[in-house]
Image (cartoon, helix red, strand yellow):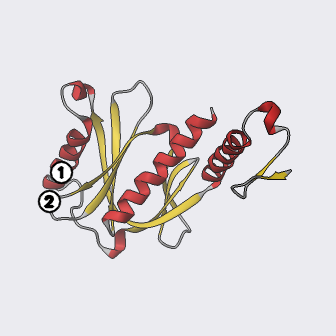
Amino acid sequence: MKLLQNGSRESINSHLTGSSNESLSLKDDKEKVDKILLQRVHFQVYYLGVVQKINMTNSKNRDTEPQLVDIVEESQIEGKLQVAANEENKVLMFVSRHGIKVMDISGQEVLHRHPLHTIAQLIQYTDGSGHQNIAVKVGQVGKHLYQCYVFQCHTKDQARNICDCVRRIFDAITTKS
């Protein structure tokens, strides 16, 4: 090892094989991916319900995010889905490389699981009452019928953090493949 003028250390082998910064960066990226894949993050949110049998075959004509929000809000108007959360609907949402697991607030009972490969879409949106919601569209690859699980978050930051957490896990898995 030798000390460079900028204070960093460099291996003599790096002169023969390329920059030590490049190999260090690749190692750091691999460690970062592994760390993300080992994470298990939980959030306290409110479960509003599920919209069953959503047919998204005409999504080519329209962006799927607004279409999904419209379907959720129509279900709320029709009384099939709660609009506002109450304490009875508080749940724990665990996000990991295995997907999303929803448990009762005590952490004793698993209410539902959504393996990562079944999550077709995850969106954050503000409803007409100003609540921060997350819609998790779940289904099988190649099928046109989906279910949409709706959760109300405490803040916009919490909703964004849940979406970012799932996105980072998806990115880490595709990077590792």
Q: Looking at the picture, how far across and down is residue 2, in whole percent?
A: 84, 51
Query: Picture quarter containing residue 68?
Result: top left
Q: CA distance from mark 1 to mark 2?
A: 9 Å
Assess disc 1: are there few (<14), some (14-19) or many (≥20) residues with their C-alpha within 10 Å of its C-alpha. some
- Residue drawn at x 16%, y 64% as measured from the top left: 129
Assess disc 2: are there few (<14), some (14-19) or many (≥20) residues with their C-alpha within 10 Å of its C-alpha. few
Q: Amino acid at mark 2?
A: Gly
Query: Eyeballing the image, is 77 above or below 54?
Result: below
Q: Looking at the picture, how far across and down is residue 34, in whole percent?
A: 67, 48
- Residue drawn at x 18%, y 51% as measured from the top left: 73
Q: Which residue is mark 1?
A: 73
Q: Earlier in the sequence, mark 1 or mark 2?
A: 1
Can see residue 46?
A: no
Q: Looking at the picture, how far across and down is residue 42, in whole percent?
A: 51, 64
Disc 1 + disc 2, Cβ < 8 Å:
yes
In this rendering, would 170 be left or right of 5?
A: left
In this rendering, would 101 be left or right of 50?
A: right
- Residue drawn at x 41%, y 24% as measured from the top left: 142
Q: Which residue is mark 2?
A: 128
Q: Amino acid at mark 1?
A: Glu
- Residue drawn at x 17%, y 56% as measured from the top left: 79
Q: Secondary structure at mark 2?
A: loop
Query: Eyeballing the image, is 104 above or below 19?
Result: below
Query: Picture quarter containing residue 86?
Result: bottom left
Q: Secondary structure at mark 1?
A: helix
Comparing 59 with 160, the one in front is: 160
